[in-house]
Image (cartoon, rainbow, N blue to C red):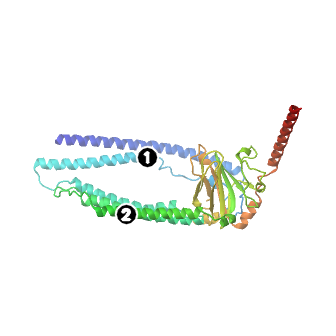
Amino acid sequence: MRLREILNIRIASSVLMICALTVSQGTVTAQTQDTTVSSITAVGDTAATSANQVSPSSVPLISTAVDTVARYKNMQPASAEVDYSAAYKSGAYYLLLFVLLCVFYAVIVKVAEVYSLSKDIQGRKGPKFDLRKFQGALFIIFLLLGLYGVYWSYAVQGPMSMHESASEHGLDIDFMFNVTLVITTIVFILTHIALFGFSYQYRGSKERKAYFYPHNNALERIWTIVPAIALTVLVLLGFFTWRNITNVSEEDQKKAINIEVVGEQFKWNLRYSGQDNSIGKRNYKLTTPTNGLGIDFKDQKSWDDQLVGEIVIPVGKPVRFTIGSKDILHSFYLPDFRVQINAVPGMPTYFQFTPRLTTAQMREKRNNPAYDYVLLCAKICGSGHYNMQSKVTVVSQAEYAVWLAKQPLYYNDDVKKELQLAEQKSAEESKKIALNTNTIIK
């Protein structure tokens, strides 16, 4: 018996040594790759610096008082020293650490058991190693580590991922999120204290026999009714919050600026409603290389529509987006404004909101002069999905009016010329048909 235990310890020690050598070898290899990556990055940074010295800086579309950084500058960040020390700490690295920890624990337990057996064989009296107490202590240690993890999530990770909403309705969504978070956190903490605490308090013992406790009606009622009430409150809160956001009255719709956003692989097409604040009709059958959106220019509401390259909206003014798609499902997503809704082919969807913070104010709040709002696609719509984004800028009403006046009309000379040629071609075909008909009659 003793010999077999000693052999088991030797086998476990050999496995521990092999894992340690594997981790050390992987670390050395990753550090070598890290050095190579740093060298390549240094060469790339040198080339980028040379290119920047030659090319002139771009001119911002709006006043520098608001757009404090040149357009798209944040897409080409300046070269900076990057620490790649964590590059080799991949999932395999942590998996090996976990295996090493398990092997180490197994070795310690085996050593303690062999020590107890050797004392029994030698007839020596004294305290024995109690594995149940040891595992109970581990439960308490992991409970404390888990509670610290909850604190870290609130104090450190939370502020990193959650920021103040840039829209008015976003404050309601954030409130709903916080209520849900508080309730679930309380339940999480209480249940884990009970789980780990009971595991420690009622750990196995030779002096105590387990009591069979099959059923308790009072407990069944408590953990059925209480969660039902909590979930009902959360569902109703979510329902009324979403209803207040999406059910916009006709009077409020008329006050909003109308903007059409049409998604396609892999870009967003943006059209402003113009002076009449009405967007012209679209028909996919009218789509041509010149008229990419298939706008029906027989509808006079489309004559003053403006084609833009990015979204610029005034602060404190409601904006109503008409959202569509030319090909497949996309998703209109403005994370800072708490806006997300699908873009469906053949079925327009709508979302109206009011921005409450300008781009300059958000940059100041985040202490980041290069920060910009952005429109993203939240559907995996193909290989170029990552590139489907557009800059969004919130400015004052005066700056918005100046910017809008500079935007070109969609109904331009090229479109008019194409329509004239199409009408002439249609007239000639009608004339030919009429002549053929007269010939047949004769």
Which quarter of the picture shows residue 250?
Answer: bottom right
* Picture mark count: 2
Whether residue 34 sits left or right of residue 57 in the image: it is left
| Earlier-in-chain disc, 2 versus 1 | 1
Say which quadrant the N terminus sits in. Answer: top left
Q: Is residue 215 above or below residue 416?
A: below
Which corner quadrant holds the C terminus?
Answer: top right
Please tell me whether mark 2 sits on a helix, a strand or a loop: helix
Task: Please name the residue that numbered disc 2 is placed on.
Answer: 225
Three-letter code, disc 1: Gly
Specify whether residue 302 is in view.
Answer: yes
Does residue 204 appear to the left or right of 290 in the view shown?
Answer: left
- Residue 179, horizontal then vertical, whole percent: 47, 65
Mark 1: secondary structure? helix
Q: Is residue 208 left or right of residue 178?
A: left
Q: Quadrant of residue 300?
A: bottom right
Give how far across and how far down residue 363 sits, in percent: 61, 63
Callout 2 amino acid: Ile
Relative depth, front residue between 292 and 114: 292
Question: Does 93 sit left or right of 197 as displayed?
Answer: right
Residue bearing mark 1: 91
> Residue sitting at 66 percent across and 66 percent down?
252
